[in-house]
Amino acid sequence: MKSLELLAPAGSPEALNAAVGAGADAVYLGLKNFNARMRSANFGYAQFEGALGALHRMKRKVYVTVNTVFEQREADRMYQLLKYLDRLGPDGLIVQDFGVIAMVREHFPGIKLHASTQMNIASVRGVNLLSKYGISRTVLARELSLPEIQDIRMGTNAELEIFVHGALCVSASGLCLFSSYLGGKSANRGLCTQACRRFYHQSAQQGYFFSPGDLQLLENLPALASAGVNACKIEGRMKSPDYVGTVVSAYRLVLDALGGTGESAAIEEAQKILLGDFARGKTSFYFFPCKKNEKPDWLKPEQSGGTGIPLGKILKVKGPDRGFLAFSSAGKELTLGDSVRLHRADDSERQSHKLTALEKDAEGTWISIPEGFSIGDEVYLIQSKAGFFPKKPFFHPVLPRNLDSYSHAPGHDSAPVFSLPVEKTEKKRKKFPPGMYVQISQVEDLYMIQSVRPERVLLDYTRKTAEHLLGDRPGPLPFSPQELILVLDPYFPQDMEPTFAEEIPALRELGYRCFVVNNLGHFSYFRSGEEDLIAGPYLYVFNRWANKFIADLGIRYFVSPLENNRQNLERTVEPNRRGFAFIPVFGYPALFRLRADLRGIYDFGGFSDSRGQRFFLENERDGSIVTPERPFSIVDKIPFLQEAGFERFIVALKRMKKKDYKEVMQAVAKAAPLPNISRFNWKDGFYRSD
């Protein structure tokens, strides 16, 4: 049986010690910028250099996370970082931004690249396209089943890496805008505030509607090895060294026993090791696909969004001065120095607290609590003073004691300047004429928007849309195929591949030639040269280098990312290329999307958080999407954008009636501000702590 590389997180030097000491074959870590866990300790340059040398002497591998998008103003810093890493020689970089790929291919071809799960690759077509551009390993999207992973393995020679343990995002990998929408703290920039794990309510239900359990595929390591996966990855760069050491030791135990007579016994022993990891309830997520109408086990609205072992609720408070409380301990033994986290009953506040007082009496166990918490609030054990192990092991330090000899750091070079092609053919201008484009989600809306006719219509290509366009529905549509641009969904899993292989040629035969592609897996369906493609907002063209990557794929036109801001847009798109950009000016952005139809779990459409903000849950066979009540709008900024040279604008409609559509289009025509809207990141950009 093929061996699996065990890849462990190292969010700090102490976690690195635990990962290596417990048996990891490789570690992944981040430096002080451009990584998806900016809130972890990460590594200074001297620490990184010392760790790299030490680990290579130990025959362990080091992968560096450069897995966020960068803005054009940061191109020099990215170039400097890549040049620094090229000189030091880690075993690979884990990347998300197409701009990083383009920069590495052109200037640092010796760097080995791995595609981050944030790149949202869930199909063999996506893996193989990346292979052509020098990506040696793809970390597959987490929302895949074992049969899909097996299919991908059968169709590619590239290395495949799978997450096997740790926290999950409820959103499809790399497609979450929730935290960014609420305050610019983007998951694509490593600053996610986990808005999905908040407490939500609506008239009949309340709970943690979108907080998934934690992934555990320990028992399925034999299946992954048989499927030909190259590496199994543990999530946790924000986790403690104790956690890292515990989880790595459990997976090491099973991997060492694979294929032998002791495999079953090793799995059983490893399961016991993981019982006290202080994490959420465990799930295999999509690994074994749910049957139709079967409720997925990974969403439990009654389960808190935080980690920790639930101890119960505060039952009574014992005196205002002492600050003790009684709680139902559910058999858990506590000691002074243990850490707990308290949740207010309405989830308006969560606070970690180290126990400074502990006593037991006939009524139960009494512990110290922070000021302001009281009866009904929940208590979770998040860290035991004794650690996870019955006898806490000593992990030898990996870093050299003296780091004075490690003095390398990124320099001050400027990123090379280049120009992209600017040709504008009359044929293309007729396909995509300047003006207003309207995006809709269902065929029925075509009849609504014909009253204020846009230049072209972007129609979401869902299962329902496919049935309408390719089925036996009689009667012509109010827009011809030449006036419609089909928008492909950004999440493209392997099990959709055979369907698209049949449908794309059929659509071409019916005259549909214009498509918005939102996933690298889409590209290989359009090789005839007969189609006109637009790179969608989920391909994240945040910088000129990403634009270059898209242009090298043969695509000139692109939709600006929904998280973008005006300053970065104008820096990214040179004045003589602004005719190629589509700018979203109105819409209800998908804050996150799930690969699941939640109609079997939740029967509501609208819900609110503890701050009174309201959202909508839209359930379809394709999946479920959460959108905000307040739309994003910059329709009043259109004249300024036109003065800057931008020509094409998108109004995206959802849940709108005919009168609402007319109101929006009238505002567009007058460049008038709309009430009760959000500017998203348009003015302030991404959150910056400096």
Image: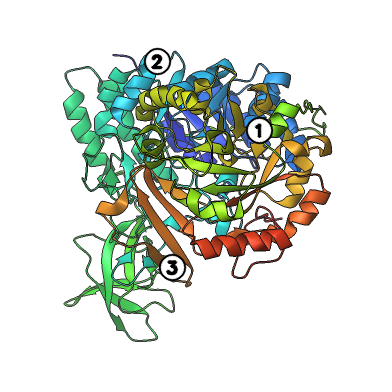
Q: Residues within 10 Å of mark 2 (few under 14, many from 20)?
A: few
Q: Secondary structure at mark 3?
A: strand
Q: Cβ–Cβ below 8 Å for labels 2 and 1?
A: no
Q: Residues within 10 Å of mark 1 (few under 14, many from 20)?
A: some
First reached walking from the N terminus: tag 2 or tag 3: 2
Identify the image quadrant of residue 546.
top right
Q: Quadrant of the N terminus?
A: top left
User: Which mark is drawn over residue 609?
Assistant: 3
Q: Position of residue 130 (x, y in %)?
A: 54, 21
**Residue drawn 80% across and 55% down?**
640
Indicate the amino acid at tag 1.
Lys
Extreme residue in the front direction = 475
For the image, the number of numbered tags is: 3
Q: Position of residue 555 (x, y in %)?
A: 65, 27
Q: Relative to residue 675, is residue 113 depicted above or below?
A: above
Q: Relative to residue 262, is residue 198 depicted above or below?
A: below
* Residue picked out by circle 1: 431
First reached walking from the N terminus: tag 3 or tag 1: 1
User: Which mark is drawn over residue 155?
Assistant: 2
Q: Quadrant of the C terminus?
A: bottom right
Nearer to us in this view, 489 or 260: 489
In the rendered view, does 498 fall on the left or right side of 55?
left
**Residue drawn 60% across and 24% down?**
90
Nearer to us in this view, 71 or 547: 547
